[in-house]
Every structure is written in structure tokens, then in C-alpha cells.
Image (spheres, coloured by chain):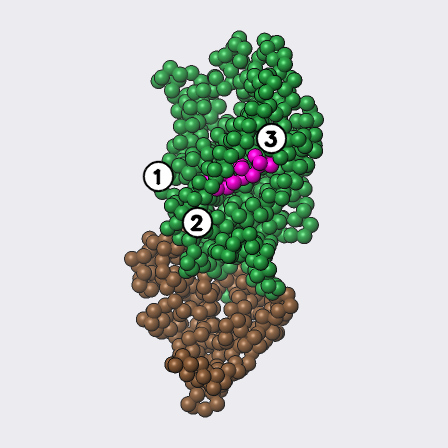
Amino acid sequence: MTVITDYRPPQLADSFWVTFRMMFKEEWRQAVDFSRRRHIALFPVMLALLSMILTVGLRYLTGEVLVSSDTESQAFTWDQLKLYMHGGIFAFSLSMGSFAFIGRVMVSQRAGGKNFLLAIPAVQPLDLVTNYFAYYSKEVSYYVLMLLVPTIIGMAGGILLEQFAGLSTPLEWASLPVVLLALTTTLSQGLALSFIASALFSKGGKWSYTIPLIGISIGLLGALQIVDIRLLIPGMLYQFSHQHWIPLVTIPLSFLLAYIGAHLVPDDFEIHVTTKSELFTPVWERLPFLGNGTLRLLVAKDLVDLWRSNTLVKMLISYTVPLLFLLLLAWLVDFASFPIPFNLLSYAPFLGFFGFQFYSWLNGMDSPDYLNGFPVALPELLRAKIVVYFLITTWISVIFLFVMSVVLDQLWALPAALIVMVANSIYIVSLTALLMGPRPNKAIFDISIMAWFYIGTIIPLLALFLISFTQGDMTIYENWGQMVSEEGLNATTSVLVEENVAGRGLRGILGVSAGLIILGIAFLMMLNRRWGRKPFEN
Amino acid sequence: MSDSDIPLVEAKDLGKAFGDFVALHPLNVKVAAGEFFGVFGPNGAGKSTFIKLLTGQLRPTMGGARVLGINVRADPRMVKANVGIVPESESPPSFLTAAEYLEFVARLRNLDEIPEKVTHWLDWFGILDKRNTLCKDLSKGQRQKVMLAGAFIHNPKLLFLDEPFVNLDPIYQRKCRNLLMEIVADGGTIFLCTHILEVAERVCTRVAVIDRGHVLAAGSIDELKDNDDETLEDVFIRLVGSSFDEIEAMEGSEEE
């Protein structure tokens, strides 16, 4: 049949730049929409400042100024610093790169209150591949500008201080382009890997279990040092080797990988009309312990959403994968007879920490705009999310702690570990809800929110982590004085050799946990003041 | 066969099932150039599904369709490139301004004189003063105007409009209606789904009434009427099976 038009839809080269440009604006405005513009603008400034301070303090971090001191061996090595820097960026990019999931949510919610460019191919002749490839490119550029460039500017500031303030740093000007290029390599690789994994996972079927298995396997290869982690993260390899071909090959390869990923995203504008048997009332009836008020209704609704939207599996995977790593780490530390007495109570606080990610998922699941017309306030919804979080994840955490206690042969510590886990979970999720409300994913570039979040999480986490060492095998400290004189301070973390240390430590742990529970409840009560007048919007 | 003989829209046994639920039973429709074709039906009748199948937003599970001679299933982007689409209840991207969205659409379609076109359509819809307002901050009606402007900006000869008048005030309903009639008078073709039967009665040259995925009737409005006194609303109610008694009883209870 004759085609009555000769106009062809735009190809990648025709539509990429305008899509990229508009997506960049969209990203910036989303961030600004959530917070005040100055908070967003302050983020790179603070990052640069932090980077400058670290640059000036590099001699202390690496122990160069402590040569011949007993504490020298306590300092970080250059290799460790590079590893942490790239490890952090790589983990961040993996967590931010699941565009196929994000895209699907945007497409499914495009008839709601908000719409995004990722959903545009539904009605405009924009190729899905161009759309997702532009999104990947935007993400790389955005994070390079918001994270990496300020870090490098801070490093440059640190070097400049050497000339003007007499403070010395081992970092050289020539290193800066290398660091920027190396970090960009790691960032683009992490985003691309996460993107292609989410695209394949979205296809369902065998991919839904193959992808997590591949991810865990690669993680194990690196963690067990079967494969040098620098080979898995070429940006890190470049940082160590300064071989310029590495970024020149890896960055284009990452973009190629993302381009392939863009082809793999299911062209799915289908409306999956499915009929289901009544679920809301049966779920609601199973929640009598929540009373008869709004909370019970909202929790029942969220549980139905979780089940029906098929996000439960994704969320559980996103929650259990870090726990599996923790379990592996516990086994590894035990297996390798690591000198520091890690024990069950050292790991328990981290279980609560992973709640942040789960809470984020819960808030991105459905648009809450429809609630604006009902006599419900936003804090009630936030509390409902927290309740759902506990209902869904607590059993997983309990199982993990139990398995870990068996692996470590520390069943005696299980009751205390459970208290620590619950306390941390209540505290971290309540803190997240208080600071970030219904939009935790959008808060990451708000300097004031993130500063409070880090202060609020790191201090109790660190406190519990350090006190937990009192519960481990203390025999290694018995000849502590001799070890320090021979090896420096790295053999131990604290000098706790008294008989009653374990008892006092346990009381300390329980005390901190009780404090966290009280704070968590206080945060829940403060939700009304912070979010009570805000509209339902995510 | 000359271009003018080819139906612009042709559905052959086109149908869609979502699992066990058949949203649209196989139907056959041809729309020629210069027609103002209306599709009516009660809520959930399958109107939007029909329009989405014709514009490549959904894949058919039965039969197929050609739009402008293009096989929709094989090349949905080619269809989207050559028609204008206003979906039901969809908004422009929230974090672009009204002007940016139109600029984006215009660049995507490789148009020339983009600033002039953007200004023209914003002005035409009376939202020129909102050009730099984020779409999320526009009212529903203003967002609908932006969506309509995005469908008109490349001057398509075929438009698929799903409830385009719903959020518009009466002035812009009339203005849009007149514009659509001008497009048809110039040889363009409109495929319209609407509940506003008074509008449809004035503009549509041919209509199809759909209920529960079946085409109940199709033809010119005069052909569907039993007598001259019957309005399109009467036809609609008669065809979809609701009796006047039921409606009157309902109205009576409202008055009480």
C-alpha cells in the first residue's frame, strides 16, 4: 500500500541534543523544585570545601607527617584512599543508574499530576533509544558537574593554599586531570552497568533472577579478591597506573554499553489491564493492630500497591543484596581471623541503615497526588510508609541476623543484635522521613538535608560500631602493649582489657539503642510540624 | 491507486485484549481524507484504546491498522511523526516551561521558524504570558492548551484527539472547534473521541458509537438518527441501551 507521506521521524543525530538539553534542564529544575535554589547551589560549594580540606589534610591521612611515630601505621595508604574514592563513586553510580525502572514508573504515571521527558515517546516521534541514551548522557554530565568537578576544584584550592597559606599537600597539579578522568570513568561505567542491568531485569523471565545472580557473582569475585577489583573498575586501574588508554577506551565503551542498554529497554507503553480479586479489604482486615484510623487504611493501600505493582520483588532484592554482602563480609572476616573483633553487634546497625533505600522505593511507587482531596495529612502517609517498611523488612533482617549469628557462632548476641537492628531501623527511617518526606531521591543534592542526614546517621552508627568491639574476642588485646610497640595501633581499635568491659559495653549498646528509639519516636512526632502543611507530591 | 483514494485511517479487524478482558472487539473502520470522524461511547467503551491502537501507543492483539498508509504496528514512530496526537488526561513534561515544551516538540520535528511558531501557538491559546511557567504549575486547562499546541505546531494533516475539549473553557472550546473545522475544510482529517455530544453533532461528518468494545453503529449523524427531532445525545442513549425512563427517573430523584 502507498504511504501518503515522505516525512521520516527524527533519528539519533537529529533529536539527541535537544532531548539531552531539555533533560538537563528538567533534572536541575526537579532538584530546585524540591529544595531552595541556594541549597542546591551550595552542594557543590560544600563538596569543593570538603575536598579542599581533605587535600590539605592528605599528609595526615596518609601518615606522611607522622613518619617514625607509633601511630604511622594507623594512617591510610594512598592505595586505600584511591580505593575508597572510586568504590564510593562506583556504588553511587550503581544506585543511580537504574533508568529502565525509573522510566517505567514515569511512563506508567504520565497521566497523573506530573510528566517527564522519559515518557514523551508515547505521543511524540522520539525514538526510545535516543530518549534513554540522552538520559544516560545527561546523568553522566550532571553528576560530573555536580560531584566530580567541585571535588577537583576543591583539590585545586587545596594545592593553591600551599602557595598562599603555607599549608602543604602531596597532591600535584598534574594529578587533577587524572583524578577527574579516572572518576568520570568509574562514574560512567557504574551508571552504564546499572542501566543495562535494569533494562534486562525489566524484560522479566529468566533475566529477573539472572541479573541479580550476575551482580552478586561479580561482587563476590571482587570481594574475595579472586579478580583484582581494579580490573573490574577500570577507572580505579587508571588512577593507579596512569595509563591514558584506559579512560579513552572505557568511557566510550560505557557509552556504548548504555546505548546497547537503551535498545534493551522494553518498548512498553502498553496499558496492562488486569482484573484482580479483592485484596484491599483482606489486607486491611489483617491489620487490626493498627487501629481503625487512617494509618491502617494507608498501610493497607501501600501493601496492595506493593503487591500489585510488582515492585515488591525489586525492593526486596535491593534490600537483601546489601545484606548478602554483609553476610559474606561476616563470613570472610570470621574465616580470615581478622584481628579486629567484629561480631554480630558490629553488623546489626547496618541493617537499619539499608532502610533508607527501601523507604525511597516505597515513596516512588505511586503518585500520592490523589490524596490532596481527602482529609488526610502528609505526615500520616509518611508514617504509613514507615510501618510498611517494618512489616515488609523486619522478618528479613531477623533471618539475616539469625544466620549471621550461626555463621559467627554468636547466638548469645542475637537478642541484643535484634534490639540494635530495630532501634537503628526506627531511627534511620524516621530521620529519613523527617528530613526528606515523600521525596528522598530528590534530596541528595540538598546540602542542608544531606548534612543533617550524614551527621544524624554516621554518629550513632559509628558509636554502635565501635562499642560493639567490646563484645568480641578480647584475648587479642591481652598483650596489647607489646603489639603496639611492635606494630603500631593498627592491631586494635581501643584498649579494653578489663573484665567488666563486655558488660559495660553491652549496657552502652543498649543505652544507645534506647536513645535511638526515643529519637526515632521524637522524629515521628516532629513530622507534623515539618510536613503537616505540605501537599501530597513526590 | 492515487493518494486521494487511500483511506488515511484504515482498521482491519483491529482489536485489543488485555488478558481475558477484550477492550476492543475486532472492528473495521475507514476514514478518508477531509473527514471529521467522531467516536463516542460510555466510559470504558474502548474509545481511548481505539485511538491508542491507531497511533501506536498500544499494540493490537487482533488485526491491524494503517494510518497514512503506514503499518502502525511495524512503524509506530513514522505514524507519530506524521500526525498530531492529544492523549486523554496526559500532561506536558512537568519541569519544562510551556515554551520549552513547544520548542522541544518543534525541534524534534525539525521545523523552521521555531520561536515564531512557539509564540504564535502560545498566543493563539491565550497563554503567552505563561510561556516561562513550568508546566506543573499551569492549571489543567492551560496544560491541555499546551498539549493541543504541541499537536498543532507542525500543521499535521491528520489529528487524533482524545477528549481535547474536556478542560477548556467555552471560549477556547469554540475557538478549537472552529480551528478543527478549518483544518478539515483545508483537506485535513480529524479523528476525535469526545463525550461532548453537542460539539460532536456540530462538527463530525461521520461517527461511530462504541460500547464495551463493540461498534454499535457507524455512519453520518443523519444516518444514525431515527427521526429529525432526535439529537445525537438521544441516539447515543438509545444505542448504548439506557432507556429514557431510567434517565428521567434519575433526573426526577435529583429534583426531589
Relative to B30, does residue A110 appear above or below in the rendering?
Answer: above
Looking at the image, is mark 2 or mark 1 nearer the viewer?
2
Q: Which mark is residue A38?
A: 1
Q: Quadrant of residue A2?
A: bottom right
Distance, label 2 to label 1, CA atoms, is 26 Å
- Identified at 43% across, 44% down, the residue is A525
Give the total number of marks visible in the rendering: 3
Horizontal and vertical percent position of residue B226: 48, 90
What kind of element bears circle 2? helix
Q: Nearer the viewer, residue A441 or A270?
A: A441
Question: Is residue A58 something one can see in this rendering?
Answer: yes
Looking at the image, is mark 1 or mark 3 nearer the viewer?
3
Which numbered disc flags the more N-terminal residue, 2 or 1?
A: 1
Horizontal and vertical percent position of residue A499: 61, 18
Q: Which residue is mark 2?
A: A379
Instruction: Tell me, by letter, which chain the rendering colours brown.
Output: B
Q: Is residue B230 magenta?
A: no
Q: Colour of chain A?
A: green
Q: Nearer the viewer, residue A263 or A507?
A: A507
- Disc 3 marks a residue whose amino acid type is Leu
- Identified at 42% across, 16% down, the residue is A168
Q: Nearer the viewer, residue A249 or B236?
A: B236
Q: Residue furthest bottom?
A: B227
Which numbered disc flags the more N-terminal residue, 1 or 3?
A: 1
Majority secondary structure of magenta residues:
helix
Which chain hosts label 2? A
Q: Which residues are magenta?
A: A417-432
Distance, label 1 to label 3, CA atoms, is 40 Å
Q: Which residue is mark 3?
A: A345
Which numbered disc flags the more N-terminal residue, 2 or 3?
A: 3
- Disc 2 marks a residue whose amino acid type is Pro
